[in-house]
Image: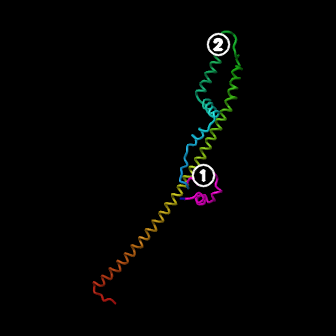
């Protein structure tokens, strides 16, 4: 089992203390043989405030076809109602340039824009946390693969050594068989030994 300091020296080429926090965390988790995967989105959602959830809901509704459809319907009803009242009573509650409608639309935009920006900032934070987590997972996977390569190289080297030792033993056995077959053939042919 490796220690985080050994892993830092071997794979990063720097002392453990000089690694950033993510690399230290990865080295420590590899040394402890613990997994790194987690659901960071679930963790972030668990820590949201009521205001953040409201901003997400407003941004989700403000960027939907339901909102656009409701917005168009309200505009058509507003203009139609003003036209109908104008035709019947020669008076309207919001005359043609629709100043009251413009005021409502301006207020809606003024309120909706910062809320959507808050939701976008929150989404950007989620994306950044997710990217950092992906980096840690990728780094751990890369280091684990390097450790596997090291183990495979060690096993291959050990096998080659064993094969060479077996081959040496076989060569010695062959030599002894050759020597014994020569001496037995010499004695069988009746050659005098010198």
Image quadrant assignment for residue 65: top right
Label 1: state its secondary structure: helix
Above or below, 168 against 41 in this view is: below
Q: Which mark is residue 25?
A: 1
- Whether 81 is among the magenta residues is no
Q: What range is drawn magenta here?
A: 2-30
Above or below 162: residue 124: above
What is the residue that sits farthest to the top in this orientation? 89
Identified at 63% across, 33% down, the residue is 50
In the figure, is residue 72 to the left or right of 180?
A: right
Assign a secondary structure to mark 2.
Answer: helix
Q: List x then y, in percent, for residue 190.
A: 28, 87
Residue, x 63% and y 57% (percent of image)?
16
> How far from the left and from the top, in percent, is residue 132?
61, 47
The numbered disc on residue 45 is: none
Name the side, left or right, on which 112 lies relative to 10: right
Give the vertical position of 16 relative to 121 (above or below): below
Dot 1 and dot 2 residues touching (CB under 8 Å) = no
């Amino acid at each position: 089992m490796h220690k985080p300091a050994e892993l830092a020296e071997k794979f990063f080429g720097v002392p453990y203390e000089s690694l950033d926090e993510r690399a230290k965390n990865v080295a420590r988790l590899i040394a402890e043989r613990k997994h790194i995967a987690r659901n960071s989105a679930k963790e972030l959602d668990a820590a949201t405030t009521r205001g953040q959830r409201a901003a997400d809901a407003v941004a989700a509704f403000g960027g939907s076809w339901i909102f656009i459809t409701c917005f168009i319907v309200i505009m058509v009803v507003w203009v139609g109602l003003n036209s109908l009242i104008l035709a019947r009573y020669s008076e309207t509650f919001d005359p043609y340039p629709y100043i009251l409608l413009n005021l409502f639309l301006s207020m809606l935009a003024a309120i909706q824009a910062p809320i959507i920006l808050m939701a976008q900032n929150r989404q950007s934070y989620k994306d950044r946390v997710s990217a950092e987590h992906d980096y840690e997972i990728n780094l751990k996977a890369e280091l684990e693969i390097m450790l596997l390569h090291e183990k495979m190289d060690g096993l291959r080297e050990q096998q080659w050594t064993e094969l060479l030792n077996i081959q040496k033993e076989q060569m010695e056995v062959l030599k002894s068989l050759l020597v014994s077959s020569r001496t037995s053939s010499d004695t069988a042919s009746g050659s005098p030994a010198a």
